[in-house]
Amino acid sequence: MPSKLEDRVKRYIKMKKFFMLSDALLITGISKDTLLEIFEKLEKEGLIIQDRDEKSIMNRSYTVFSRHEKRAITSKSEDKKIDIELIKSINKVSTILANGELQRVYFEVLNETKLTKGVFAKAVNVLLKLGVLKEHRKELEIKQNRTFEIDKVLLDTLLTFHKQKKYKDIQEILDDKKPLRYVAVPKELTQVLDVIIGNEVLKRDELARQSGITRKRLKDWWQILKKLGIVIDSFKENEKDRISYIFSSKRARVVLAYINNGAYEKDKELKHLWTH
């Protein structure tokens, strides 16, 4: 059974997409060692992931997974599981590659990453498969001395997915379910759709707060939400209450799927998805 301290931490991260250890310490009032123990437990449960392990522990940051991402991480079905450790090692190798020359030597990059040989080799094999790296190996040359040519466009694309914390998309790329191609998406709109998928009745300020955007920015997206058939109705429980809105989570899922497949790149107003 979760402790009171753990419940306090869960309440803190519930409305977050990412946070820093220093902020969590300040808000929760829990000691550092206890908080780190709770974070370790929440990582195992698939609720959060350590995003950056800075030299200063106070600057360590964490990403909070959405319900959909958590289901994927904790799923018993292997083809749906997000391999977080592999993705983190690929990101570490990719980040180092991005900061160097377009040709790198195997053992030099290995030493810079400080990964074990096995983990590093697995990450490199994935990057070779994706076309991010192209191997140059002379006859009889030992494995550690081989060089790689870097495809800068594909590397930048992969790092963009990491920066935007799109771990589910990265896993689908690793599983050959989609190509390594960046699709421009309206981040604010997708955040709003994610919230609506989990909450079909909300007031405007609640939707804005949970989406991590201002009420003004939500107002800018409101007409599109209505035209997309996502805002269904509204009501007041009594005269003094603010208006509550009824949303279609099913329609939000459909629109989000189209956006993730490149619909927004073709039409910024998504007119072909309007229902009225």
Image: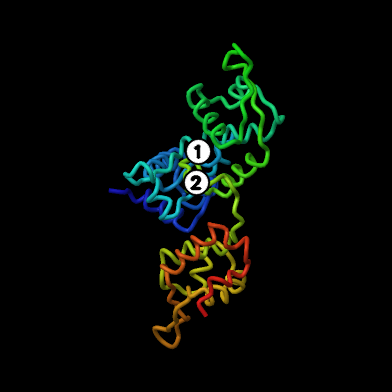
Would you call the spot at circle 1 few (<14 residues within 10 Å), some (14-19), or many (20 or more)? some
Q: Residue furthest bottom?
A: 239
Where, by quadrant of the figure, is residue 236 drawn? bottom left
Instruction: Say which residue label 1 marks.
Output: 87
Q: Are marks 2 and 1 in contact (CB under 8 Å)?
A: yes
* Res 183 quadrant in image: bottom right
Q: Residue furthest left?
A: 1
What colour scheme was applied to this rendering of the protein?
rainbow
Q: Which disc, if any, is residue 167? A: 2
The amino acid type, in three-letter code, at marker 1 is Ile
Tag 2, which secondary structure?
helix
Residue 180 placement, left or right of 249: right
Residue 137 in percent (x, y) is at: 62, 19
Looking at the image, which residue is at 41% across and 68% down?
250
Does residue 16 lie above or below 158 as drawn?
Answer: below
What amino acid is found at the position of numbered circle 2 in the picture? Answer: Tyr
- Say few, some or many: other residues with alpha carbon within 10 Å of mark 2 (under 14 / 14 to 19 / 20 or more): many
Which labelled disc corresponds to residue 5?
Answer: none
x, y percentage for residue 171?
Answer: 47, 43
Q: In the figure, is residue 67 to the left or right of 120?
A: left
Residue 271 in the image: state x and y as whole percent.
58, 72
Q: How far across and down, in percent of the image, does residue 105 sit?
A: 65, 22
Q: Nearer the viewer, residue 22 or 124?
A: 124
Label 2 and label 1: CA atoms lie apart by: 8 Å
Residue appearing at x 37%, y 44% in the figure: 45
Q: Could you tell me how many numbered marks the image carries?
A: 2
The answer to which of 167 and 213 lies nearer the viewer is: 167
For the residue pair 257 and 117, the one nearer the viewer reads as 257
Q: Secondary structure at mark 1?
A: helix
Quarter of image, res 159? top right
Residue at left 61%, top 36%? 132
